[in-house]
Structure formats: C-alpha cells, structure tokens
Amino acid sequence: MGVANRLDLTLRLVQGTGRISVAELSQRLGVSEMTVRRDLDTLEHQGLVRRIRGGAIPTRSRDEDAGFAAREDWQAATKDRLGAAVAERVEPGSRVLLDAGTTTVHVAEHLAARAPLTVAVLSLQTAMRLADRPGIELLVVGGRSRPGERSLVGPLALRTLESLVFDCFVMSIGGVHAEQGWTEFSLDDAAVKQAGLAQSTRTLAVADATKLGVRAFSQVAPLGAVHAFVTDSAADDADTHPSGPQTLKALRDAGVDVHLA
C-alpha cells in the first residue's frame, strides 16, 4: 500500500472512532506498529490527529474542512480515472443519486459528458462541481452538513431520499470486506447510503483499491446489495494489496459486476 493511500485510511480510521490504538491500526491496515507510529507522526505534523499514549485521536486543523481537504489531493490521478470509468456506466437521461466523498467529486466532473441527467447530490463538494453545468438538472439533498466532510446527513436527508426514486445510485464506500460487506466510517453516512440503496434501481459502488479488505465501523449492506463495483487495477495485485484478490473474488461470487479501471 502506498504511503498516501495508507495515510488516507489511517486518518479516516482515527476520525471514525474518535480514539484508536496503534495496535488496532496495525491490525486493520496490515502494517507494522513502527509504520503506524511514523504515519501518525506525519498526520500530527499536519494538524490532523493528536498523538496520545498508545494511539491517536482526531483534531481540528486551522482548516475546518481538514478531513476532506487533506484527502482530496491524495491519489487524485487514480480517483479521476475511477470517476471517468463510473461516468461511462451512467446512461444519459438517468436520474442519478451521487454520494459524498473525494472519489465522487471526480465522478461529478465526468458526468457532464453524459448529459442530459438529473443528479441529486449528497455533498456540498459535488454540488459545487455540477452547478450550472449544461444538461445537468441538479438537486441538492437537504440535511445537516457533517463537519470536515460536508456530506449531507441526518433525518432531513433521509426523509428527502425516501420521497425520491433513482435509476442509479453512485455509492462511495469506506471499506469493502469479503465477510462484512460494504462498511462505512460514519454512522450518519452509513444511514444515508442505506437509504440510497433502498431508493435506487441499480447501485454502482466506487472505491480505490486501498478500501478492499478494510472493515470500517458501520455495516452498510452485504456484498450482493450492489450491482457493480469500479476500482483500480491495483486491487488485483496481491503484492501491493494482499486482501485485494480475495475481496474481488468474494464480490464476483456475490454476483457483483467488477470493473478494474
């Protein structure tokens, strides 16, 4: 796993729990405790976590949006390639629900080429990318903006989703595990994704290869609840992603159409 990818997951695990030990991070990421300590030092230097005895807790940096902003540029080229691959699988004329996340921002950039589309978005970041794009009818799902991520969550978001029906849900995900299925770091985000799954004819999940084999803290759905999954080709390389091939096999066995971009 590359350093940037590992820092991404480490930050999200710290933020997702509020407090996590070096030993647990080592187990979840499949790296040595010495590597975890170095990564936590890097994140602390950036103002994103605070080291405590035996582990770390999240902290606010000077930038209120540090969570999203810190990850936005990590693996940007890979995420842009995934965004293009996802957009190609969205039919013009569709009613699309677009999830929050750094990867779906890149999906949004490529969706304009698939117009006309009606796109409901679950984050302020994707709304900004799609505003005023020709051929895109933009709907911003109401709700509470989650600090640090600007994803739209809470009872208002859930009620809005329950009143709408979509042809396609483009779902980002924090972790995908052979046994635990699709998992997310935030309970609020997990609830919104569950509503999106229930209200959509078809769900297309997207995540870079670092998310394969990761067990986040809230189960969203079993593997078979998703129709297709787009990830990068590194997912099939056991040397860089030991859990990748096993997870891809579990997805295919569950009937998920897997695409490597």
Image (tube, rainbow, N blue to C red):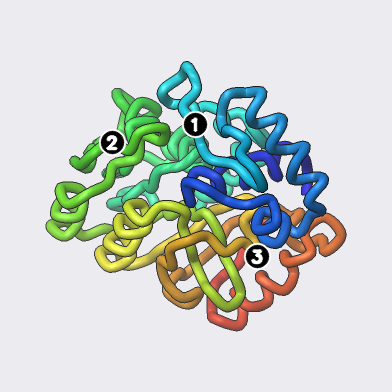
Q: What amino acid is found at the position of numbered circle 1 in the picture?
A: Thr
Tell which of 174 and 229 is nearer to you: 174
Residue shown at 49%/31% (left/top)?
59
> Can you give x and y, in whole percent of width and height, for residue 70 in the image?
56, 28
For the residues labelled 2 and 3, the Cα–Cα distance comes to 29 Å
Whichever of callouts 3 and 1 sits on the residue coming sooner in the sequence is 1
Pick the front one: 6 or 35: 35
Say what amino acid the circle numbered 3 marks: Gly
Q: Name the residue under label 3.
A: 213
x, y percent for residue 231: 63, 55
* Residue at image coords 32%, 50%: 97
Q: In this view, does 221 lie above or below 108?
A: below
In the rendered structure, the answer to whether residue 153 lies left or right of residue 41 reads: left
Image position, residue 114 (x, y; %): 42, 42
Q: Name above or below for residue 62 compared with residue 114.
A: above
Looking at the image, is 165 positioned above or below residue 22? below
Residue located beneath label 1 in the image: 59
Left or right of residue 80: residue 125: left
Discs 1, 2 touching: Cβ within 8 Å: no
Q: What residue type is labelled 2?
A: Ser
The single residue placed furthest to the bottom in the displayed view is 253
Q: Which mark is residue 142?
A: none
- Quarter of the image for residue 121 reads top left
The residue where tag 2 is placed is 145
Q: Earlier in the sequence, mark 2 or mark 3?
A: 2
Dots 3 and 1: beta carbons under 8 Å?
no
Q: Is residue 87 visible?
A: no
Query: Label 3 to label 1, Cα distance in Å?
Result: 26 Å
Camera-side residue: 178 or 27? 27
Query: Considering the numbered disc 2 on the image, is that residue within a helix, a strand or a loop?
Result: strand
